Image (tube, rainbow, N blue to C red):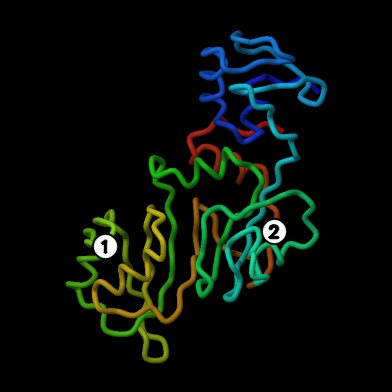
Amino acid sequence: MAERLQKIISQAGVASRRAAEKLIEAGRVAVDGQVVRELGLKFEAEEHIITVDGKPLASRERHVYFLLNKPKGYLSTAKDERGRRTVLDLLPEVRERIYPVGRLDNNTEGLLLITNDGALMNGLLHPKYEVEKTYVARVTGELTPEKIKALREGLLLEDGMTAPARVKLLGEDRGLTRAAITIHEGRNRQVRRMFAAVGCDVRALKRTRFAGLTLLGVPRGQHRALQAQEVQALYRLAGLEEAEA
């Protein structure tokens, strides 16, 4: 089926559709060796050689989108050179080349998106769009009003100040304090480091919400395909034009 050139480029994971339009207008896109500058032209990707800056587009796969409830003990990567378990081991039936959107460390569980849509992945992780993530933590020590205030206003970590966070106390659990924290940054082990900065050690951490999605109905270690309207909502959050069927 013939599709607009900018859509083909976007679906290949090179750039968003709007950015692809700029590439075309700048004369950086060629079809069968001929530079194309006109927007809106349609082609069948499988029948033409389409290049951006002289590099052919990767062969396009059907885009797939999954929500995984990651257990502890799985690496958030597509492959591990040491042979350790990765989150893709939990989706053995998927044949497409998929990747996790961002990372949860080995000892963190909860919501992780898995897809082969590079443009969406890049948009959801881009700091510009401030896509929110909520975690439930069980920590040692008392979360005093002063500590909560510091978490909410931002903390100085070794890699700079954190953005303000939303924090809610959830009560006690076997001698530990439970709290929900919502951030939009994606620094390495950020939540654990934020709590450590106020004198609390995280003993258990679970991501319960990401980009408006929750774990409702998805048991630990299981996954489900995203619905079309959920994918559309993610596209909007990532600053992209809506996905087309």
Q: Can you tell which quarter of the image residue 178 is in?
A: bottom left
User: What amino acid type should be assigned to the residue bearing mark 1?
Assistant: Glu
39 left or right of 144 in image: right
Question: Please, is residue 25 above or below residue 57 in the view?
Answer: above
How many C-alpha atoms fall within 10 Å of the one at disc 1: few (<14), some, or many (≥20)? Answer: few
Mark whose residue sits in front, 1 or 2: 1
The quadrant in which the N terminus is found is: top right
User: What amino acid type should be assigned to the residue bearing mark 2?
Assistant: Arg
- Which residue in the protein does label 2 denote? 224
Question: Please, is residue 242 above or below residue 221 in the view?
Answer: above
214 left or right of 51 in image: left
Nearer to us in this view, 198 or 56: 56
Counting the numbered discs, the total is 2
Q: Identify the residue at image location x=39%, y=46%.
A: 130
Q: Are marks 1 and 2 in contact (CB under 8 Å)?
A: no
Secondary element at tag 1: loop
Q: Which mark is residue 158?
A: 1
